[in-house]
Amino acid sequence: MTKKDLRNFFKGILFISPWLLGFIIFTAYPLFSSFYLSLTRYNVTMKAKWVGFENYIKLFNDPLFWKSLKNTLIYAAGLVPIGLVVALGIAILLNKPMKEVAFYRASIYMPSIVPAFAFAAVVTWFFHPYLGFVNKILEAIGIPAPLWLSSEKWVKPTIIIASQWGVGGAMLIFSAALKDIPKELYESALIDGAKPFTMFTKITLPLITPTILYYLVTSTIGALQIFDLPMLLTNGGPANSSLSLTMYIYRHAFTYVNMGYASAMAWVLFGLTAIFIAIYFITSKRWVHYQY
């Protein structure tokens, strides 16, 4: 390396130093600290005591950990595909030429920026077992109304359904992807006599697969970290049937002040998320198309 190269290298480091400092202080240090704490017994008031993999072994014998993990996977299995269908469906509907499209997009996006506690209050009223709007409609058409958030059977589906109110952000991303598809492709397909369903499966869907991959990665990360709605609506109840893994981590970290155990669970969640993302990227070579 010449002196000029070395000088340019240090100039580059100087230019990125604000980001580099922020990354070291706010990301790298907490990351490695949490891994170290996961190998210790630490309750904040006392010095961390090294216990090796004791916390991880304890995890696998903790029935509530397995229940929260199962709940989290159910949330992810519901939130990701339903969110994809809802967001893409709305984006396709709003991709048609109409004067009021900006108003409709803004109306659908607005709920996604409402604070979680305000949104939770609306959801509580909507799904109230006796006074709620949803049960009033079901009773009017003669369908037995469930207890929704008070039922172990219905609480997770209710949270998954309620979470679709925040689908506006994904809808905007899919709308942008649909706008990028060349109109000439649809015109050629129409001349060849293609039906709308054929155009969707042969043109629209393949050409937005990079956006679908982006959605799957980001929504899966979000779903596996679901916290605010179950926390605000049920606090994990009834009988821990809505307890997510992040809520269980929170309980151990800030209620029981058991930071070592909470850090071990956080690393298990990190590993689980990494496995999902790796599967997406490995399989994406078969179904994601980056060229027309």
Image (spheres, rainbow, N blue to C red):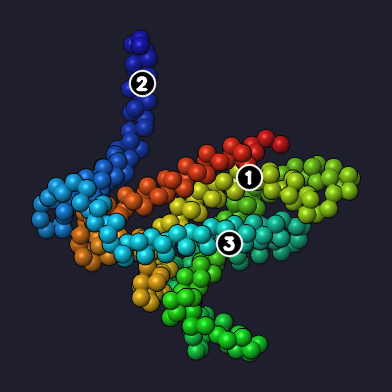
* C-alpha separation, residue under disc 1 versus residue under disc 2: 38 Å
Amino acid under disc 3: Ile
Amino acid under disc 2: Phe
Res 209 label: 1
Q: Is residue 292 left or right of residue 123?
A: right
Classify 10 Å Cα crowding around label 2: few (below 14), some (14-19), many (20 and above): few
Residue 18 higher or lower than 217, as above or below: above
Res 54 label: none
Give the foreground label among 2 and 3.
Answer: 3
The secondary element bearing badge 1 is classed as: helix
Closer to the chain start, of discs 2 and 3, is 2
Q: Which residue is mark 2?
A: 9
Which sits in the foreground, 130 or 168? 130
Q: Which residue is mark 3?
A: 82
Amino acid under disc 1: Thr
- The image shows residue 289 at horizontal and vertical percentages of 65, 38
Q: Are marks 2 and 3 in contact (CB under 8 Å)?
A: no
Closer to the chain start, of discs 1 and 3, is 3
The secondary element bearing badge 3 is classed as: helix
Q: How many marks?
A: 3
Residue 172 appears in the rendering: yes
For this orientation, the residue located farthest to the front is: 61
Q: Residue at x 64, y 37 (%)?
A: 290
Q: Residue at x 37, y 30 (%)?
A: 15
